[in-house]
Image (cartoon, coloured by chain):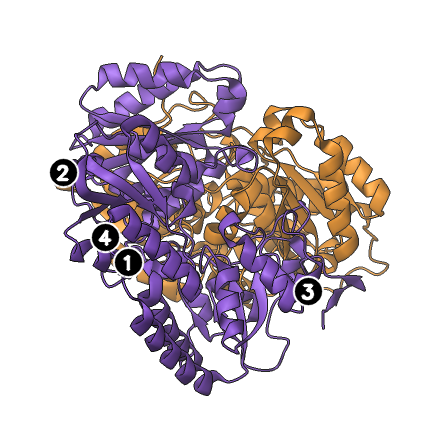
Amino acid sequence: MLRKINDHPIRSVHLLRSSDPDNLFPRTLEFSPPARGTWNIVHTGMQLPESHQIYVCASGCLRGVILTAAEMGCMDRFSTIELLEKDLLRTDNEALILQGVTDILKNLTKRPRAVLLFTACFHHFMGTDLHYIFHQLSRRFPEIDFIPCIMDPIRQTKSITPEERLRREIYRQWRPLPLRARACNIIGSNLPTDDTSEILTLLQKNGWTLRDMTTCRSYDDFLQMAEGSLNLYINPFGHRAALDLQKRYGQDFLFLPQSWRYSEITDHLNRLADKMQVSRPDFRPRIAECELAFEALKQLIGDTPIAIDCTFTFCPFSLARLLVEHGFRVLKIYSDTVPAEDRDNFEWLKRHYGSIELWSTKNPDGRLAHGNTMGQKILCLGQKAAWFNGSPYFVNLVEGGGHYGFDGLLRLIHLMSAAFLVPKNLPEVIRRKGCGGSCCL
Amino acid sequence: MKYHQNAHILSTYSADTFGVCSALFELGGMIVMHDPSGCNSTYTTHDEPRWYEQDSLIFISALNEQDAVLGRDDKFVQDVIDSAMQFRPRFICIIPSQIAFLIGTDMKALAHIIANRTGIPCFTLPTNSMHYYERGIFYALEWLAKQAVQQHVPLQKPARKGTRSLNILGVTPLDFSPDSVSSLRQWALNAGFTLQSCWAVGESLDTILSSTNACVNLVVSYGGLGAARVLQEAIGIPYVIGTPIGALRSLLAEALKRSADDQHIRAPFLSGHPIELPVQAMTAGTADNPAARPNQMKKNAQLLVGESICTQSLAFALEREGAEHWQTIVPVETESSLLLPDTMQLTDETDLQPAFRVADKVLADPMYEPIIPTRYGVSFIRLPHAGFSGRLYQKEIPDLISTKGFQHLRKKIK
């Protein structure tokens, strides 16, 4: 079943039945597969209208974020202050940042409403006084909101991640507004949720106003989100922000995980209906539609093996469980962690489908353990699964692509049919960063 | 105090760590950047066009705060050993990024431990992600040259009269597109040389290590200079500096033949005559040493921006063809002995803008375009450079080594 490297077992895979969800793979060196569709902090920050990003770090770190902005075609909203070796010893780093940001802002043709200022691991280790910097900047430019962001991957496994912090700090810019009944927000998402998803139809049908930063056209639109009495989040990176907003503004929140099973979707949507204090919708017709669609998909793809990766959806085990419950042959799952909201599905699969292969996306052995070794078509859900399996038959989505609920499931089934029938140009498709966003490549 | 490190809109050049990876990419080694995370995907996304096609062993240590604060070098060592035992690479290169550098990790000691425990050669290079890629290439190829010297076995019989063998040093995708590399090889053959090796694209480690019986070396970018010096000092292989573009195609061929015979070091783009270059320590670019050279900003200049050897060679070639002077700006590390008297070392946006403001034409990577004052009549000609814009304009990168590519650029300039 499994290949070896130099007669050693591959470290990047084991069977689900022998997996420990708290420690799927030991922490070791990391490999970066060439699938680039995931979103990073630059992409997320660009969603904030009328904002400008400034990164303060060394060239090695700057290069990734600059070229992300360049490939988005957003260099006019992006500036940098490059740290040099001399700054370790001879520079007043507070003064460097203050003067650098001041110079940058004075030279912009139009003053941004907000500046996302990213400092780095370097400043954490040097003990740079960030509070002083932000205080001074706010005094110098009172008309601009300075958003303290940190690009410090060195702390991300034990502390708040840069993605979580970014979201929390962005929403902290809201000013308190009287909370309005029947006004809610989706926070933390990179991609807008489909208009046709049951979340949106449920809200609209009951006269609720919905705002989402991904669809805000101006900074004022964004600030208006503060009047929402309810914050919804689908992306788990929104959790810290939701907690923070509840504490600061008293906004209620609801986590709607990107689950795929009927019972989970129904449960999430019912909880939303309960929060809205409206009657729970009858989802049986939607489930019937899904069943019909699954039947057709099954007839089309039969026992074709399926591989799913963790960049495709926040809940890969939920999706895998749904598929195996409908008779599909899920062969491989690519994930380095088990999200808390997906743990039950992991345990269920472990008990009932323990022969599913669980693969790491970043273990070094992945460098050599890739390519289509099965000699047959494999349908992949996600770019990383596609690359690891060398399969042009894949659904090209990240973070669920903004699809949600039964509507999202029907879309997924349609996309799986299309992906099964029409191969994609794998290297060309997966090289683009921030799938679903703007890209000049 | 005035700082010069702000960029409103400019990119930054690839980092020294990525230069090391790029230079050693194809040689069967395992390279580990000692850094939290992110560097690996930056390099493999933007600076490494071979990442999709070739399974090179380049990893990151995924250093976290706890390991850094508590000095968990043992974890790093064990992780490297585990992977080394798995992959059995030809060599292991461990390079520090800024945090490992900042906390003073003793990389040499770690390399020594790893080499002892695995039996695989392991070394480190003085990187920190706070310098540019040419410096990384320089160190990596210099290390290769030292290994080659150790394994050098002089030829029993002198080479057949009339046959001249050549190494080309300093070739990476950061400065040379795949087409340029093919053209370099073809040029060497057409010029009557047997190409012993090309450091380091399209070669195996063995080919490179056994290339020490070449008659002469050609240094086509600054990254190759350290290796050339080692081979010259230890084995006596002379070297010629320059990139074979336009008129330099024949001039370099001639210079190489003469150097193979008289053992002189030559740099025809600096002078039409043989010159002896002083051997001196590498000096940083303006990023570290703004007062390194006086910069002569001239009104109505024609400016070329890029790596020192490639760009000055191009300037020379254009000048020979068009009889108009091209002044060069070198934003990345190099040595002052390699620079023409009026070549400027400028890196930062605030330093570059005054030079661009008084120029007539600027030939540079498209990512410089936003700071070119075209409204004042300065014309801008795009010359994409992977070391600056990564993969963004990859399809537009011209093959200037070929006569066709060079002539096409000339037409664009007119």
User: Between tags 3 and 1, which lies in front?
Assistant: 1
Amino acid type, mark 3:
Gly
Q: Which residue is located at x 37 percent, y 39 percent?
A: B328
Of the two numbered discs 4 and 2 in the rendering, the one whose residue sits closer to the viewer? 4
Residue tagged 1: A280
Give the image location of residue A390, x and y in percent: 55, 71
Q: CA distance from mark 3 to mark 4?
A: 92 Å
Q: A23 or A64, which is in the foreground?
A: A23
Give the crowd class for mark 1: few <14, some 14-19, many >=20 residues within 10 Å: some
Query: Which residue was labeled with disc 4?
Result: A278
Q: Could you tell me if residue A20 is visible in this image?
A: yes
The single residue placed furthest to the bottom in the displayed view is A299
**Depth check: A282 or B349 in front?**
A282
Which dot marks residue B376? Answer: 2
Chain containing mark 4: A
Q: Nearer the viewer, residue A426 or B109?
A: A426
Asked whether the beta carbons under mark 1 and mark 2 sit within 8 Å of each other, the answer is no
Within 10 angstroms of label 2, few (less than 14), some, or many (20 or more) residues?
A: few
* Both marks 1 and 2 on one chain: no
Identified at 38% across, 16% down, the residue is A131
Quadrant where the N terminus of chain A sits is bottom right
Subunit of label 1 = A
Secondary structure, mark 4, is loop
Give me the chain that's orange. Answer: B
Name the disc covering residue B162, or none: 3
